[in-house]
Image (cartoon, coloured by chain):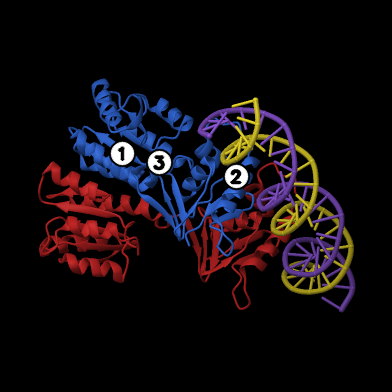
Chain colours: A red, B blue, C purple, D yellow
Amino acid sequence: MNGTVLVVEDDTALCELLTWNLSAEGYEVRATGDGEEALLMVREQMPDAIILDWMIEQVPGIEVCRQLRKDKETAQVPILMLTARGEEEDMIRGFKTGADDYVTKPFSPRELLVRVEALLRRARPSLTGSVLQWGDIELDATSHRVRRGGEPLHLGPTEFRLLRYFMERPNRVVSRQQILDGVWGMDSDIDERTVDVHIRRLRKAINRPGDTDPIRTVRAAGYAMDVS
Amino acid sequence: MNGTVLVVEDDTALCELLTWNLSAEGYEVRATGDGEEALLMVREQMPDAIILDWMIEQVPGIEVCRQLRKDKETAQVPILMLTARGEEEDMIRGFKTGADDYVTKPFSPRELLVRVEALLRRARPSLTGSVLQWGDIELDATSHRVRRGGEPLHLGPTEFRLLRYFMERPNRVVSRQQILDGVWGMDSDIDERTVDVHIRRLRKAINRPGDTDPIRTVRAAGYAMDVS
DNA sequence: CACTTCTATGACGAAAGAATGACATTGCGG
DNA sequence: CCGCAATGTCATTCTTTCGTCATAGAAGTG
């Protein structure tokens, strides 16, 4: 699942087209044709992006946009506005109201898809690969945080780099020398045995009682982190 | 000054048009027609957004985009690509390469302006006059005021910029050098340890007894401000 | 089993990194 | 001109982390 997209569009055919395309890209899609309902759905479960038609029944799209931006909870949701008109004024109003992108009908579905992708990339960096995962372990390189089963773990700088090194190379056996080169730097004159000690510290830090140890010792070769 | 925009465009007339329009909107504009030079200019002083023509001499725009995205330092700069062609493939490639928006010539200057504004709103919220928030801390960039739980706080100029710098990058760990570049300016020859001192002053200024400290120290890496 | 080879572990001193308090300097408004 | 706030640097203290070693343990080998 790449993320959740809310489609607000009252033209049934178009709505289905969008839903189909987005689903095919791996997004979870929820849809409605009604502005009021859209606002409710956003509060119920925050989507990662919203595609919002300008001309929908009851509440105009721009009003939905305004409402969303006004509320602190929803002010940051990326919004892509969709309109039949080619009026420049409309577009400008859309942007001024807080829309992040604006596409006019008729549009190419592929264009819409890449634009949605661009929005998500900016709004949710975590969707674009800055977070490494191994089973229930998450490592976020940007925020320098590691969690296991949601619980934050405390790792020293070297343990952090070591874990990242392994998570970037799942299933691969690496020698101590390779680890030294990759984690300490090519020119480190550190004893190979020191790697053992850091492996132990890393294990101690990430394994709570009952957990399975992600790091496999390969005798006479090195270590590896297996996919679960 | 609303922010700095780098225009990369080798059509002199168009370049001037863009420069003029952007300047009129209050942006500080720098311009070049050369891709290599553009990369240098970005490293020299990080702009808040880049308008990048697809067809420029020597290095194609898309290559500039790729280079920028590859480097961790510049990976976050918003890029708006500009092209004469109407080819959908080009557009998709542009987005896939990491562009944030894409406009085809001929375009309306006003459209370009609002799109740039939308990009900046996401990337540098403080430039658009909005109020940044972190839990019960509010920072109003335009009036230079900071409150916590409604109580006004007194920050020195540097502490203010430092706090704004962090609030624009929630959850992100930034090195002392990055902080120096972003808060003091790219060419400051200030000791890295001085950052520590200002962090302390900032902490002292915003944390009243019983408050949680928003600033996390990341040993051997820098600091980060976590979302509550 | 006896032996060799490799790994895990606990302890410890050294070093690194960060927090803190103090101080000199600068710029500004009164 | 003086006082005050802001700023950059330094020395000191404090905490965390690192690298090594000695020893115990485990895994191959013949």
Please provide percent x and percent y for residue A51. 22, 57
What chain letter is assigned to the residue under label 3?
Answer: B
Q: Tell me if I can see residue B90 in this picture.
A: no
Q: Could you tell which of marks 2 and 1 lies nearer the N-terminus? A: 1
Circle 2 or circle 1, nearest the eye: 2
Q: Which residue is denoted by mark 3 in the rendering?
A: B77
Q: Which residue is denoted by mark 1 in the rendering?
A: B80
Figure quadrant of residue C24: top right
Residue depicted at 45% across the width and 41% down the height = B70
Please provide percent x and percent y for residue B59. 37, 28
Q: Quadrant of the N terminus of chain A?
A: bottom left
Q: Amino acid at mark 3?
A: Val
- Please tell me whether residue B114 is drawn above or below residue A74 in the rendered image: above
Please provide percent x and percent y for residue C2. 89, 73
Q: Could you tell which of marks 2 and 3 lies nearer the N-terminus? A: 3
Res A159 label:
none
Residue depicted at 21% across the width and 43% down the height = B88
Q: Amino acid at mark 2?
A: His
* Distance Cα–Cα, label 3 vs label 1: 10 Å
Q: Nearer the viewer, residue B69 or A11?
A: A11
